Amino acid sequence: MVARGQASPGILKTYATERQQIARDLIAFDQKFSKLFSGRPAKDVSDETGISLEEFRNVFHQGAVFAAGLSVDYGPNVLVVKEDEGKEGTVRCRPDLANKLKIGMRLPSHTIVNQSDALAIELQKLLPSDGRFRLIVFAGDISKPEIYSCFEKLGEYLPSKDSVVSLYTPENSPRDSVIEVLTVHSAKRTDIELQSLPEAFHPFDKSRGWDYWKVYADDESYHEGHGQIYQNFGIDRDEGCIVVVRPDGYVAAMVAVDDTQSLEAYFGRFMIKL
């Protein structure tokens, strides 16, 4: 994004600040792990100098989690906002809106159901590391008028010339080429008609037609069960929230569904208006 002139060179500093500590942790883990293979196995539970099977198993599991990137926790920086910054024009981060998600860590995956064709899909399959930010709109139960009204207002904001999508998307580029908007609602899928939703959530492209892969439901699938993503993320099925996901799949911030000012404050920290 920096090379394309879309983001400030200042974000490059996060490469070192985020990864130096991870590198130190990896070196320390490798040293510990190698000692398990070279050490003497414990003879029995009273053998305190030997390596027990339980210790070996625990460290092996820790290594698998570490290698998968699931234990990495990036601290606050220009790309990661972990709490309300408390000033006008800053990010009003709301980690309480998804209290089982951890900002700065990789977004976990759960099954969701495509609104258009009812196919179950893992959330992570929608998040390839292709250089795009994602706004995952957990819109809540949009079958309820008061909740749909909030969702509709967001749908009016996103196509406007001053929205974060419009400000940072190059002219003549697809609307989702820099910031992709995905929706996961908590209503019963069959109660919602895709074409009745604001176009911002299922945009039309002259060459590609309608986009049927942007809106999903946290609902029972026909063959894959219920992913319970709202429950697993700790999101209220009525209130919802917006989760900002970095291009590398890590959670960057969480804001209320109607808090577009915080979205502008977040991206305004490092993105360059085009």
Image (tube, rainbow, N blue to C red):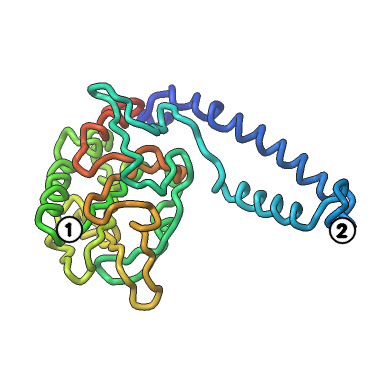
Residue 152 circle label: none
For disc 2, the neighbor class at 10 Å (few under 14, some 14 to 19, many from 20) is few
Residue 142 circle label: 1
Percent of width and height locating residue 51: 83, 51
The residue tagged 2 is: 44
* Cβ–Cβ under 8 Å for marks 1 and 2: no
The CA span between labels 1 and 2 is: 59 Å
- Image quadrant holding the N terminus, namely top left
- The disc labelled 2 sits on which kind of residue? Asp
Percent of width and height locating residue 221: 34, 73
Residue 198 appears in view? no
Q: Does 60 sit left or right of 269 as displayed?
A: right
Instruction: Give me the residue at 85% from left, 48% from top.
Output: 48
Percent of width and height locating residue 20: 61, 29
Instruction: Give me the residue at 16% from left, 43% from top.
Output: 159
Instruction: Give me the residue at 72% from left, 36% from top.
Output: 28
Helix, strand or loop at mark 1:
loop
Q: Does 85 sit left or right of 106 as displayed?
A: left
Instruction: Give me the residue at 72% from left, 56% from top.
Output: 57
- The disc labelled 1 sits on which kind of residue? Ile
| Location of residue 190 by image quarter | bottom left
* Residue toward you, 37 or 199: 37
For disc 1, the neighbor class at 10 Å (few under 14, some 14 to 19, many from 20) is many
* Residue toward you, 232 or 208: 232
Residue 243 appears in view? yes
Helix, strand or loop at mark 2:
loop
| Location of residue 111 by image quarter | bottom left
The vertical placement of 188 against 158, above or below, is below
Q: Earlier in the sequence, mark 1 or mark 2?
A: 2
* Residue toward you, 206 or 261: 261
Q: Nearer the viewer, mark 1 or mark 2?
A: 2
